Amino acid sequence: VDPAVLKKMKTELTRFMMTYKFALDEMDTKISILQEEFQYVHDYNPIEHISTRLKSPESILEKAQRKKLPLNLATIRNELNDIAGIRINCSFQKDIYEIKDMLSAHQDLRVVEVKDYIKAPKENGYRSLHLIAELPVYMSDRVEHVAVEIQIRTVAMDFWASLEHKIFYKFGEVVPNDMRHELKEVADIAAQLDTRMEGLHRRSEQHKEQYYARESMKSLQ
Ligand code: 0O2
């Protein structure tokens, strides 16, 4: 290959990857701002943990080949929505939808797809809310609209998904029935934990409100 052509290809690929890194940086900032401001206004932080990941060029190519896509950057940008991923782990299930609404209200962020694996869990028990959002990334000579996959889940959903990912997710072969059932059962137990913890949270809020109301009555007497 002509060295000049090779150099141009390398520059294009690096700039392509950079747009996804910048999109993740922007998302990270957006979420940190929400987190800080929400804590200030509501005296409560709904986000336990945020992590970001950028697919490596090798796994982008592997996925493009698996999907039988022509190997050019424009097609890959249009067809692969999970090159940049951000995962938001929340405390409670209600926080997931609150965060979704807050992010969807951002004018520069266009939610192009929602997959609600909480209302409709996957057959193996996987639960999570997935959004594909597009946001503009301003480069020196162009604006790119870059897709980011946002996974929002509770810590209990994340516990199950992270371990299932290690145990089976990329196994690629048929998982024996008894193990499939047990994984699904464990996912359902995690969902019950979410419901119970959320119930406890609600009751504790009511309890605290009543307590402070009683205390302020006492101070008036
Ligand atoms: P990794 O290693 O986590 O990055 P598409 O991208 O639309 O072609 P798909 O599978 O329809 O592919 O998208 P979907 O369902 O939104 O899932 C994308 C991501 O969600 C996966 O990314 C996982 O991170 C997560 N996920 C989906 N299903 C499961 C599951 O059953 N178990 C676990 N642990 N994670 C899941 P990747 O790139 O496949 O994997």
Image: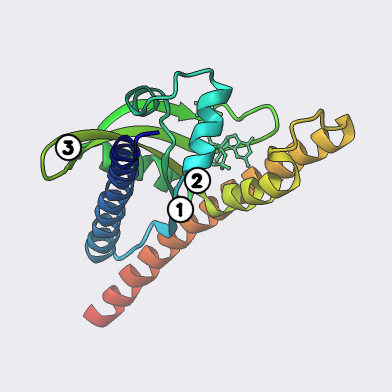
Instruction: Count neighbours of disc 3 (C-alpha within 10 A) and say few if under 14, some if 14 to 19, many if 20 or more.
Output: few
Residue 1's disc is: none
Color scheme of the displayed model:
rainbow
Q: Quadrant of residue 191?
A: top right
Answer few, some or many: residues within 10 Å of disc 1's Cα (few below 14, many 20 plus, some between 14 and 19).
Answer: many
Q: Marks 2 and 3: which is nearer the front?
A: 3
Q: Of label 1 and label 3, which has the lower sequence position?
A: 1
Quadrant containing the C terminus is: bottom left
User: Which badge, 2 or 3, is on the more N-terminal residue?
Assistant: 3
Residue 120 location (% of width, % of height): 56, 26
Circle 2: residue type: Arg
Residue lying furthest front = 2
Viewed as shown, does residue 13 lie left or right of 128?
A: left
Q: Is residue 15 left or right of residue 81?
A: left
At label 1, which amino acid type do we have? Cys
Whether label 2 touches label 1, CB < 8 Å:
yes
- In this orientation, which residue lies closer to the viewer: 72 or 201? 72
Residue wearing tag 2: 153
Residue pointed to by mark 3: 108
